[in-house]
C-alpha cells in the first residue's frame, strides 16, 4: 500500500509544495545562492525564483539583516557537516521585496551530496515568527521595566516549592536578608537560622491558614545579620497550585527604616498624649487640691478630738471608735484620689487590654473633677450603672477620653446660667455607647466639620492645645471604636462607641 502512494515521488513533492504554508527553498552551498523556492515563499516575500537567482552571491547582502549575516555564514559551514536526517535550527531577519524585515525560524537539512559524501545543497523550511518575536520583545521590555521597578523599590522576588521545601531567590533577596549567595547549607535552613524564633512560629501559622483558605498571605519577621544587626522584613506571597504541584511566589523588602519611623511616630504620639494629659491635670489642679484638702481637714479635726480626750482624761470608747473610723474612711478617700492621679499621669499607650466595669471608668474619672464642677455650680447627672457591665480596654486611655470630654463641657458652659453635664450609658449587643451631654446649645456645622482635627480649638489663646479631641479620637480608633459629635441633638453631645471585646488586631495595635 505504501509503495502505491510513494511511486510517483515527483507528484508527491508537487502536492506537498502547494499544500505547505511555509516557505521552502533549496540553497546551493557551493554557489552560495538560493536556486529554488516554492510558490508560498514567493507569495510571502515577493521574490520570484528568477529574481532570487539574479541576486547571485549578493543574496545575503540584499535580503538579510546585516547583523545576522555572520550567523548565516556560520550556519552554512555547519550545514556541510550535517548527517543525513539531522536538522539545524536558526533564526534571523529576512527583508521582503517591500523592504520590511521578517523574523524567520529556519529548519535546515542536507538535500544533496557529491561523490565524496560532502553536502552540496541544503533544503530549508522557513517559518515567519515575527509575531512571536514581537511578543517576546514586549515581554522582555515588560520584565526589564518590572526589574527596574523592583530594584528602585528594593524589592526582592522569591519562589517557594511547597512540595520539596526549596527556595529560589533573586540577588536582592540575598542582600535584603544579609545572606551570602555562596551557602554551605540549604537556603531554607539558613533563613530559619537567621529568623527570630517567635516570628517563625507565628508566620508558619499564617502560611498554613493561607494554604487552607487558598488566599494570599502577608508576613513580617526579624532576621539577624552576621554583624548582629536586626532587620525587619515584610513579605507578600501568593500560593498557586497546578499540575499537581504547589508553589508560592512573592516579594519581600527590608522595612527596618519604616519600622523605626513608626516607632518614632508612636513615641511622639505618646508624648503628645502625655502633654495633653498633663494639661488636663493642670486645669483641674485646683479641684484636685480641694478634693484632698477637705478630707485632710476632717482628719485634722478628728485627730484634735482624740487629743482633747487624752488631755482632759475624758476617754469615751464609742467616740474614739467613731473618730478612728472617720479617719480611716477619709484616708481611704485620699488614697483613692492619689491612686487615680498616679494612674492617670502614667503613660498608658502600651498597657495591656483588661476587662473593666464601666461603672469604675466613670467613677474614677469623676474623682478628678467632681469638686471643681461643684465649686462652679455645675450639676453632674450620672445614671445607675449595672455593676456587671464590663468592657475590654486600656483603662487609662478611656478615662483620658472621658475626662477630656468632661473638661470641654466645663469650659463650654461654666459661664452659662443653666449649667449641667449628663453622662449616660447605653448597652448594645456587642458594644457600649457612653454619651457626654452638656447644657450648651450645640456646635455650628462649620466648626463641627473641623473639631476632630489636630490643633483646632475654639478656646481662647493660651487655653487648650487643640489636641484633646484629635488624640481622643485616635485612642478610640486603636480600640476599634469611635468618638463622634452627635447630630440633630438639642444640646451638645459627644458619643464614645466602644466594643465590649477587642479583636486580635486591636490587641496588637
Image: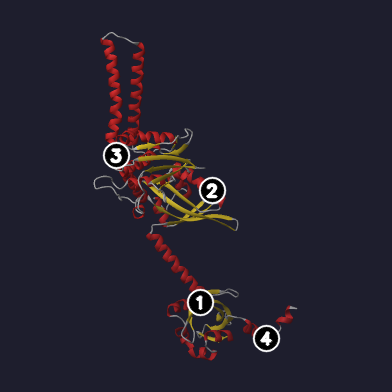
Asked whether the beta carbons under mark 3 and mark 4 sit within 8 Å of each other, the answer is: no
Tell me residue 306's x, y (percent): 29, 14
Q: Distance between the residues labelled 3 and 2?
A: 45 Å
* Residue at 46% across, 38% down: 391
Q: What's the CA distance linking mark 3 and mark 4?
A: 104 Å
Labels 3 & 2 near each other (Cβ < 8 A): no
Dot 1 or dot 3: first in sequence order is 1
**Residue 278 image label:** 3
Q: Nearer the viewer, mark 1 or mark 2?
A: 2
Q: Which colour scheme is used?
A: secondary structure
- Label 4 residue SS: helix
* Foreground disc of the pair 2, 4: 2
At label 3, counting other C-alpha atoms closer than 10 Å, the crowd grade (few under 14, some 14-19, many 20 or more) is some
48 or 248: nearer the eye? 248
For marks 1 and 3, give the CA distance: 75 Å
The mark found on residue 155 in the picture is none
Q: How crowded is mark 2: few (under 14 residues within 10 Å), some or many (20 or more)?
A: some
**Residue 483 % position (x, y):** 40, 46
In the displayed structure image, the side of residue 345 where residue 29 appears, left or right: right
**Residue pointed to by mark 4:** 11
Pick out the residue farthest to the top.
313
- Number of other residues with Cα within 10 Å of mark 1, as a class: few under 14, some 14 to 19, many 20 or more: some
Q: Which mark is residue 209?
A: 2
Which of the marked residues, 3 or 4, is nearer the chain's N terminus?
4
* Residue 38 visible, this angle: no
Amino acid at each position: 500500500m505504501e509503495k502505491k502512494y510513494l511511486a510517483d515521488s515527483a507528484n508527491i513533492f508537487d502536492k506537498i509544495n502547494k499544500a505547505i504554508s511555509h516557505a521552502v527553498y533549496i540553497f546551493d552551498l557551493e554557489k552560495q545562492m538560493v536556486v529554488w523556492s516554492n510558490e508560498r515563499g514567493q507569495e510571502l516575500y515577493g521574490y520570484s525564483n528568477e529574481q532570487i537567482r539574479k541576486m547571485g552571491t549578493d543574496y545575503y547582502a540584499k535580503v538579510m539583516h546585516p547583523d545576522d549575516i555572520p550567523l548565516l555564514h556560520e550556519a552554512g559551514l555547519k550545514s556541510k557537516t550535517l548527517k543525513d536526517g539531522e536538522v539545524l535550527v536558526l533564526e534571523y531577519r529576512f527583508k521582503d521585496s517591500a523592504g520590511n524585515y521578517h523574523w524567520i525560524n529556519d529548519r535546515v537539512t542536507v538535500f544533496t551530496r557529491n561523490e565524496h559524501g560532502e553536502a552540496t545543497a541544503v533544503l530549508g523550511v522557513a517559518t515567519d515568527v515575527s509575531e512571536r518575536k514581537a511578543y517576546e520583545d514586549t515581554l522582555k521590555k515588560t520584565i526589564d521595566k518590572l526589574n527596574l521597578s523592583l530594584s528602585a523599590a528594593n524589592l526582592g522576588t522569591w519562589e517557594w516549592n511547597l512540595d520539596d521545601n526549596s527556595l529560589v531567590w533573586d540577588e536582592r533577596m540575598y542582600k535584603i536578608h544579609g545572606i551570602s549567595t555562596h551557602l554551605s547549607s540549604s537556603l531554607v535552613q539558613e533563613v530559619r537560622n537567621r529568623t527570630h524564633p517567635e516570628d517563625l512560629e507565628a508566620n508558619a501559622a499564617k502560611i498554613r491558614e493561607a494554604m487552607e483558605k487558598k488566599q494570599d498571605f502577608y508576613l513580617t519577621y526579624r532576621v539577624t545579620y552576621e554583624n548582629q544587626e536586626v532587620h525587619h522584613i515584610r513579605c507578600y506571597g501568593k500560593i498557586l497550585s497546578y499540575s499537581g504541584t504547589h508553589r508560592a511566589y512573592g516579594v519581600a523588602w527590608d522595612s527596618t527604616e519604616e519600622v523605626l519611623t513608626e516607632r518614632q511616630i508612636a513615641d511622639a504620639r505618646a508624648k503628645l498624649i502625655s502633654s495633653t494629659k498633663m494639661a488636663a491635670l493642670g486645669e483641674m489642679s485646683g479641684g484636685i487640691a480641694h478634693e484632698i484638702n477637705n478630707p485632710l481637714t476632717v482628719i485634722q479635726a478628728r485627730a484634735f478630738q482624740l487629743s482633747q480626750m487624752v488631755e482632759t482624761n475624758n476617754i469615751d470608747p464609742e467616740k474614739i471608735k467613731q473618730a478612728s473610723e472617720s479617719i480611716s474612711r477619709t484616708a481611704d478617700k485620699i488614697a483613692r484620689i492619689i491612686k487615680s492621679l498616679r494612674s492617670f499621669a502614667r503613660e498608658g499607650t502600651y498597657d495591656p487590654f483588661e476587662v473593666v466595669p464601666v461603672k469604675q471608668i466613670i467613677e474614677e474619672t469623676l474623682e478628678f473633677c467632681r469638686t471643681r464642677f461643684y465649686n462652679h455650680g455645675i450639676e453632674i447627672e450620672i445614671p445607675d450603672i449595672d455593676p456587671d457591665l464590663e468592657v475590654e480596654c486600656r483603662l487609662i486611655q478611656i478615662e483620658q477620653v472621658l475626662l477630656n470630654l468632661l473638661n470641654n463641657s466645663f469650659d463650654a458652659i461654666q459661664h452659662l446660667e443653666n449649667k449641667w453635664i449628663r453622662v449616660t450609658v447605653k448597652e448594645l449587643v456587642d458594644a457600649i455607647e457612653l454619651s457626654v451631654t452638656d447644657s450648651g446649645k450645640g456646635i455650628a456645622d462649620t466648626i463641627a466639620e473641623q473639631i476632630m482635627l489636630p490643633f483646632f480649638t475654639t478656646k481662647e489663646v493660651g487655653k487648650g492645645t487643640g489636641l484633646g479631641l484629635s488624640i481622643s479620637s485616635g485612642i478610640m480608633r486603636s480600640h476599634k471604636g469611635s468618638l463622634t459629635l452627635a447630630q440633630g441633638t438639642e444640646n451638645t453631645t459627644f458619643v464614645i462607641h466602644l466594643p465590649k471585646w477587642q479583636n486580635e488586631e486591636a490587641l496588637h495595635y
